[in-house]
Image (tube, grey):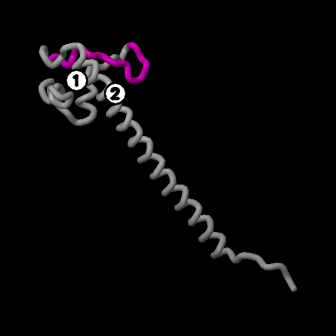
Amino acid sequence: MKGISLGPNVLVLLVLAIILLAAILSLFMTQWGSGSETLDLQAEHSRLCNLFVLSGGCDTGDTDEVKTDLDNDPSTIETLTDVCAKIGINGKVACARSCGC
């Protein structure tokens, strides 16, 4: 009895299935990365809001006074206003309100 071998059609289907699986996996990995970035921005927003409120920012309303360095690059220091804009809160007044002022 001869050995059992897979036909060419089955091999092609296996290769296509592996490529499809890799594509789906890369799609999910890309979406996971953006979700963690959103969580990082939310955490930074919360931290900056605490600093803003504790430093009396609700009285002045100037959300540009609280600064952060999200990517550890001194040339791209961002303010609370910038972080608010990245999570979809536009304007200083709306940003201050998102901090509970």
In this orientation, which residue lies closer to the viewer: 4 or 62?
62
Sequence-wise, which precedes: disc 1 or disc 2?
Answer: 2
Q: Residues within 10 Å of mark 2 (few under 14, many from 20)?
A: some
Main secondary structure type of the part rendered in magenta: loop
Left or right of residue 92, residue 13 in this image: right
Q: How many marks?
A: 2
Where 90 falls versus 74 (above or below)?
below
Q: Residue at x 24, y 17 (%)?
A: 54
The magenta stretch is 61-74
Of labels 1 and 2, the one closer to you: 2
Whether the magenta-drawn stretch holds residue 64 is answered as: yes
Q: Which residue is mark 2?
A: 44
Q: Position of residue 37 (x, y in %)?
A: 39, 36
Extreme residue in the front direction: 54
Q: Quadrant of residue 78?
A: top left
Amino acid tagged 1: Thr
